[in-house]
């Protein structure tokens, strides 16, 4: 599913215009990004949680040349699905 598909689905299920659905989807995504940038954890019951993890600096290698490359420390987004979501995906019933 793409973002456009998600917007169409929200529009259809919510009986909204495509423009209103696009605003809703964009607002949700922007809120998630803003919270993760601030270091907050986002928990959606029955779906999962989003948080950031800190990666330590390390030495990598350029695969083309084999040269050593310093990779700086960084925060990465991480999603952990809930047990309910895992069960729904594996059992296929709602």
Image (spheres, helix red, strand yellow):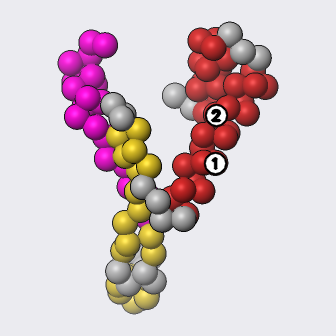
Residue at image coords 44%, 49%: 42
Q: Magenta segment, which residues? A: 76-94
Question: Is any atom of residue 66 visible in this view?
Answer: no
Task: Please give left or right for residue 77 compared with residue 89 in the image.
Answer: right
The label shown at residue 61 is: none
Residue at image coords 73%, 33%: 23
The label shown at residue 25 is: 2
Confirm whether the magenta stretch covers residue 72: no
Identify the image quadrant of the C terminus.
top left
Task: Please give left or right for residue 9 compared with residue 59 in the image.
Answer: right
Q: Which residue is mark 1?
A: 30
Q: Which of the 4 quarters of the picture holds residue 3?
A: top right
Q: Nearer the viewer, residue 45 or 18?
A: 45
Question: Of label 1 and label 2, which has the lower sequence position?
Answer: 2
Neighbor class of circle 1 (other Cα within 10 Å; few <14, some 14-19, many 20+) is few
Give the image location of residue 71, x and y in percent. 43, 82
Give the image location of residue 24, x and y in percent. 67, 32
51 to 25, vertically: above or below: below
Give the image location of residue 76, x and y in percent. 43, 64
62 to 47, vertically: above or below: below
Residue at image coords 41%, 38%: 44
Q: How far apart are the two marked residues, 1 and 2, measured between alpha carbons?
A: 9 Å
Q: Nearer the viewer, residue 41 or 90?
A: 41
């Amino acid at each position: 599913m793409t973002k456009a598909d998600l917007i169409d689905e929200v529009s259809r299920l919510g009986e909204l215009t495509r423009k209103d659905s696009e605003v809703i989807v964009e607002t949700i995504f922007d809120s998630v990004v803003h919270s993760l940038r601030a270091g907050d954890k986002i928990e959606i019951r029955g779906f999962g949680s989003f948080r950031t993890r800190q990666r330590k600096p390390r030495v990598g290698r350029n695969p083309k040349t084999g040269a050593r490359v310093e990779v700086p420390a960084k925060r990465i987004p991480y999603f952990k699905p809930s047990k309910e979501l895992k069960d729904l995906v594996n059992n296929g019933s709602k």
